[in-house]
Image (spheres, rainbow, N blue to C red):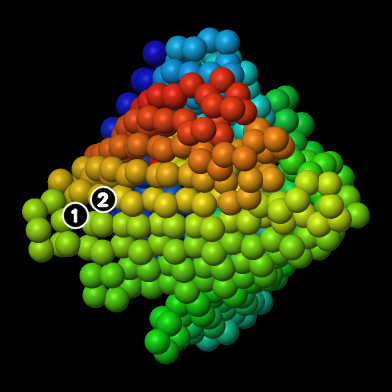
Amino acid sequence: MKRLLLLLFVLGALQTYGQYVPIKMLRYDENYAALRSDSTENFYHELKFTPLSKDGRTYISFGGDVRFQYYHVINDEWGEQPDKNYAYVFSRYLGHADFHAGQHFRAFLELQSGMANAKASTSPADENPLDLHQAFFDLNLFSKKKNNLVLRVGRQELLYGSQRLISVREGPNNRHAFDGVKAMFSGVNYKTDLLYTHYVASKKGVFDDGYNKNIKLWGAYMVMNQVPLLRNVDLYYFGFDKKSNTYDDGTGKELRHSVGTRIWGKSGHWRYDLEGIYQFGDFAKKKITAWTASAHVDYMLDHLKFQPELGLKTELISGDRNLGDNKLNTLNPLFPRGGYFGLAALIGPANLVDVHPSVNFSFTEKFSLDVDYDVFWRYSSNDGVYGPNAALIYSGEGISDQFIGQQYSMAADYVTNPFLRFGCELTYFKTGDFLKQAGPGKNLLFLCLTAELKF
């Protein structure tokens, strides 16, 4: 009851918010300096912009995110869980403070709390009571010029492109973070990030997500806009070093390099996102050779009632060709979106062939509905099926059938105002021959109800 009353109080205080700055996935990308000239006096204005100097150039901004999710699952993990029909609740709280001292210095601090109630088994991605999620400072070396350079040091979220390799992991209850340094160069039509980080491994205690030396991530990501013919192009390289990792072909130390490109944009009624990645390196004295190619194309019928948008996604993701040889062909998605194929988060992007048609309806400006169908096969019959966190679910050894199953989903989204959102996702997964041979192979039904307040 106390949580509900607090939620209603904050929501009521936000009803007259004056000048509004859009809330972004990466909260540190929001800029409230423009509120210096906003004469509105209310709770929201003071929350987002509290001047600490007479000219208002030194200020502090506060914000947060409160999310509640109710889940109901029948045959969780395709029947592996002993409780075949049960429900649980996730709650997540994020709160941040953003301090700016003029144009050249900035410090950002964010705490995160994620709790799971009544779930049969939990991981640190589900439950992490309270921890330091982000804590970094920025040095802006060339502000207000065509070419800009910002140096960021500390614990921070990372998100790049389509989030195929690097994501904040918004779907699960706790988001990703990294400890390290990042240099950000930007110009009129380009932006380049150079980074060297250590992944922050979540733990179930309080303020125990300390420095982790076992997983390293480094690389470069460049975005070019207004490219002739192609419109927008991303070019990137990521290096990944993990002390111990596990695939169907064994366990051992992994050093992997990923190079990729993404072409994306919009032309008329069409929207497109094409991406290719090649990986190489070493795993447990085996040579890594892996790849993925994906296409996501949408066509908008905005002249029709409810403005339907037709979509088609398809992916080819390599898997290991032969168990026990001196090669590994399984793609490592590194740190992808947690709910890669929906909030049900059943399958991850490794050793996979995926065809995913969909249609989206916009009934009003606030209410939309997405209906989609997804069908999965293993790319290689000599490799297993992996989860969204790239962990092996079922080994493929001794099973020749490649058909994993079919997923039917419906997701509704209702945005009452810029701060409050309600969502509903219903998923039915019909298992294929592989899952029936590898495990219980029960058909799965999944329901998620979401209420989220961002401010």
178 vs 124: above or below: below
Query: Which of these two is toward me, 45 or 440?
Result: 440
Q: Residue at x 83, y 47 (%)?
A: 324
**What's the distance in space between the residues labelled 2 and 1, CA to CA?**
7 Å
Q: Give the SS element for disc 1.
A: loop
Q: Which residue is mark 2?
A: 359
Query: Which of these two is toward me, 135 or 196?
Result: 196
- Quadrant for the C terminus, please: top left
Query: Which of these two is toward me, 134 or 430?
Result: 430
Q: Residue at x 34, y 37 (%)?
A: 409
Is residue 47 found left or right of 246 in the rendered image?
Answer: left
Is residue 342 found left or right of 117 in the rendered image?
Answer: left
Is residue 284 found left or right of 300 in the rendered image?
Answer: right
Q: Which residue is mark 1?
A: 308
- Residue 372: x and y in percent read 32, 44
What is the total number of numbered labels drawn onto the structure image? 2
Quarter occupied by residue 399: top right
Q: Residue at x 49, y 84 (%)?
A: 188
Query: Which of these two is toward me, 216 or 330?
Result: 330
Q: Amino acid at mark 1?
A: Pro
Q: Residue at x 82, y 42 (%)?
A: 250
Cβ atoms under marks 2 and 1 closer than 8 Å: yes
In the rendered image, is residue 414 in sight? yes
Q: Give the SS element for disc 2.
A: strand
